[in-house]
Image (tube, coloured by chain):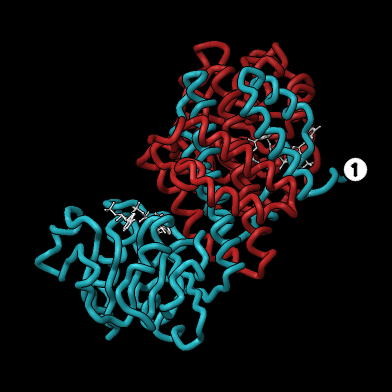
Chain colours: A red, B cyan
Amino acid sequence: MISVVILGAGNVASHLYRGFREADNVTVSQWYNRSLDSISEHSNEVDITDDLSNLKVADVYILAVSDDAIAELSEQLPFEDRVVVHTSGGVGVYDLDKKHRRGVLYPLQSFTKGAELDFANVPMCIETIYKDSYPMLKELALSLGGPIQKVNSDQRRVLHLAAVFVNNFTNQLYRIGHEITESEGAEFDILKPLILETAKKIEHLSPFRAQTGPAKRHDKKTIKKHLKILDNNIEHKKIYELLTASIQKTHGRKKL
Amino acid sequence: MISVVILGAGNVASHLYRGFREADNVTVSQWYNRSLDSISEHSNEVDITDDLSNLKVADVYILAVSDDAIAELSEQLPFEDRVVVHTSGGVGVYDLDKKHRRGVLYPLQSFTKGAELDFANVPMCIETIYKDSYPMLKELALSLGGPIQKVNSDQRRVLHLAAVFVNNFTNQLYRIGHEITESEGAEFDILKPLILETAKKIEHLSPFRAQTGPAKRHDKKTIKKHLKILDNNIEHKKIYELLTASIQKTHGRKKL
Ligand SMILES: NC(=O)c1ccc[n+]([C@@H]2O[C@H](COP(=O)([O-])OP(=O)(O)OC[C@H]3O[C@@H](n4cnc5c(N)ncnc54)[C@H](OP(=O)(O)O)[C@@H]3O)[C@@H](O)[C@H]2O)c1
Ligand SMILES: NC(=O)c1ccc[n+]([C@@H]2O[C@H](COP(=O)([O-])OP(=O)(O)OC[C@H]3O[C@@H](n4cnc5c(N)ncnc54)[C@H](OP(=O)(O)O)[C@@H]3O)[C@@H](O)[C@H]2O)c1
């Protein structure tokens, strides 16, 4: 049985709490947040606290707090030589105070408090400084039921960056699609099956092989028509031009 | 019973052939292609031809051929005053020869010959010049079992453009994610659940409300780190900057 103390009560912390409570070989010994408001409803299930000096002894302390708060909170923990991890893709493992046995448990998924989430779809990326903390963190991550991956700092860094491309930037392309369709009173909703199909297609095909469309075909006539429609939105036009050029760079010149 | 002649034998034509054959109230009377090779395997199911002067009388002729071939092929059809539609998002309805009762049946989905496709996930956009061809085309589109939408030329034009953003451009973001992760030997595969979640999220949330991440949060520290990683790829860096700016324009200034 692995005992866990969760620190923080936001999107990630609240899902991890639920995930670990459902896991067989993990106990959440305690839940800390700087304010009790958001965790008090769980006080009959778990020991809750807003006082760092009250923290119990546990196998691992998970700092699921804002990126900017990680370093300071890890410093304030009134103990040393225990396993302390944060959950961020973008913060270094060395940002944790060096008095701890430091690591990272980065869940590569988008969390929203209150929204449903199946941990089977949450790959857990594990990074440790010392090898000997890995087996326990591995078991902990596996207990959630999704895939796990051992990563080093560089790999976690690029995974976090790539996640911005495939999640935040992709979502912005959906938003632009929404704006473009609405400009003529067309329904954004009828793009949704295409959006889903685009995401599903790369389950069995590389994004390279999955590419289609006017940019890849070097279909100048269509590209010109599209740019004309975008004349009233210089920013969308720039995005169109840049991504068209990017596709053409990836796929090379048209075959004659 | 609606009788259909399909012209072309590519991605769209071959799926439409199968879709209409499975539909209750539609018969495919004939299948034309300029070369018989790709349709000859169906010669025991349907009348096939490579000779336009042999075309049968039918309720509707579907020109599922390359965009550039639509105008010319419609001109070559040796009859007039019959319903003739093309299946393109990017070609005008007036590009069809005016001797026909012209229309468009634009399937808003990505087709690949040989790949499975459920027509339940293919919204059919219907455009006609004369109102009286609409009821038949509506019935024809409904027979495939997916959603249908009446559109005008402007709406079809922007739907086609929006499809490029949410399909081709999104897929290129996946590709960039692939390149970025591979550069450090990380696994692109563990981004797939996030990719799918991103697409699914907007089923019940607008892309505006679904947005998260460093750009929206105006998280300058993370953005700076990411740009530094991208220093060795000026093109990916430009895309990062442009989409970050786009998100920030959409969501306005950070709340203080
Ligand atoms: N959301 C995601 O999709 C996601 C995905 C992967 C990784 N992550 C990472 O997971 C971590 C948490 O993200 P989140 O989305 O859960 O954040 P969040 O919802 O904004 O919650 C942040 C939590 O941190 C606490 N906190 C903030 N400043 C603090 C401080 N100075 N001292 C102590 N506690 C403090 C907050 O306390 P209060 O409740 O009192 O405000 C809150 O409980 C971050 O490192 C993030 O990068 C997030
Ligand atoms: N693919 C998609 O995802 C998709 C989605 C929505 C709409 N569309 C539209 O559907 C139409 C067909 O696209 P597709 O992807 O099916 O194309 P495709 O797979 O490239 O097939 C093109 C077909 O057109 C025929 N063709 C080309 N030039 C011709 C000519 N001059 N005369 C007669 N036939 C000619 C080809 O004949 P051969 O077999 O002899 O080469 C082939 O059968 C296009 O208007 C496209 O914009 C496509």
Q: Is residue B50 visible?
A: yes
Q: Residue at x 34, y 51 (%)?
A: B112
Residue B224 sits above or below residue B9 on the image: above
Residue A32 sits above or below residue A180 on the image: above
Residue B184 sits above or below residue A165 on the image: above
Side of A91 where B21 appears, left or right: left
Side of A76 where A7 appears, left or right: left
- State the image coordinates of residue A161 (x, y, percent, origin top left): 61, 29
The answer to which quarter of the image holds residue B236 is top right
Q: Secondary structure at mark 1?
A: loop
Question: In this orientation, which residue lies closer to the viewer: B201 or B243?
Answer: B243
Q: If the picture is divided into quarters, which one holds ligand 1?
A: top right
- State the image coordinates of residue B42 (x, y, percent, origin top left): 15, 62
| Residue type pointed to by label 1 | Leu
Total label count?
A: 1
Q: Is residue A117 visible?
A: no
Side of B239 where B55 appears, left or right: left
Q: Residue at x 22, y 78 (%)?
A: B56
Q: Residue furthest left?
A: B44
The answer to which quarter of the image holds residue A106 is top right
Where is mark 1, residue-wise? B256
Give me the chain letter of mark 1.
B
Badge 1: residue crowd in 10 Å (few <14, some 14–19, many ≥20):
few
Question: In this orientation, which residue lies closer to the viewer: B100 or A208?
Answer: B100
- State the image coordinates of residue B253 (x, y, percent, origin top left): 85, 45
Q: Residue at x 46, y 49 (%)?
A: A198
Q: Residue furthest bottom?
A: B132
